[in-house]
Amino acid sequence: MIEIDRESITPMYLQLASALRERIRRGEIPVGRRIPSHYELEQETGGAVSRRTIKSAIEVLQGEGLVQGVQGKGVFVVAKPD
């Protein structure tokens, strides 16, 4: 379960990106593995976030060079955070 604090001053997409980054760092989602789908992430947050929020969180991780999308297959971890 991914905890999202709706009352936090930190935007929800950054909270989600942080949770995914931590999973990657700990090896829960290893390099080469697909991250959970939009639907799975929505379920893991208890429906607390929208698909747009999930997309924004993934864009943050892509910008950091941690994940890369593959058309028709999903988003995969390509590097661990420093």
Image: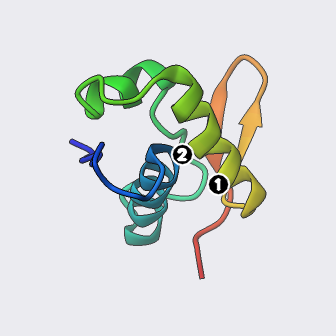
- Please, what secondary structure does the residue beneath circle 2 have? loop
Callout 1 amino acid: Leu
Q: Is 74 left, or right, of 30 in this rendering?
A: right
Image colouring? rainbow
Gap between marks 1 and 2, in whole Å? 14 Å
Q: Where is residue 50 in the image (x, y as percent from the top left)?
A: 46, 23
Q: Which of marks 1 and 2 is in front?
A: 1
Mark 1 or mark 2: which comes first in sequence?
Answer: 2
The answer to whether the residues at label 1 and label 2 have Cβ atoms under 8 Å apart is: no
- On the rendered image, what quadrant is the N terminus found in? top left
**As rendered, which of 15 and 74 lies closer to the eye?**
15
Picture layout, residue 48 above or below residue 9: above
Picture layout, residue 34 above or below residue 25: above
Q: Position of residue 71 (x, y in %)?
A: 78, 22
- On the rendered image, what quadrant is the C terminus found in? bottom right
Residue located 49% across and 61% down the image = 21
- Please, what secondary structure does the residue beneath circle 1 have? helix
How many labels sit on residues? 2
Please give the residue where the numbered disc 1 appears in the rendered image: 61
Picture layout, residue 73 above or below residue 78: above
Q: Residues within 10 Å of mark 1 (few under 14, many from 20)?
A: some
Residue located 37% across and 25% down the image = 42
Q: How crowded is mark 2: few (under 14 residues within 10 Å), some or many (20 or more)?
A: some
Callout 2 amino acid: Arg
Q: Is 25 left, or right, of 66 in this rendering?
A: left
Residue located 68% across and 57% down the image = 78
Please give the residue where the numbered disc 2 appears in the rendered image: 33
In the picture, the disc for residue 8 is: none
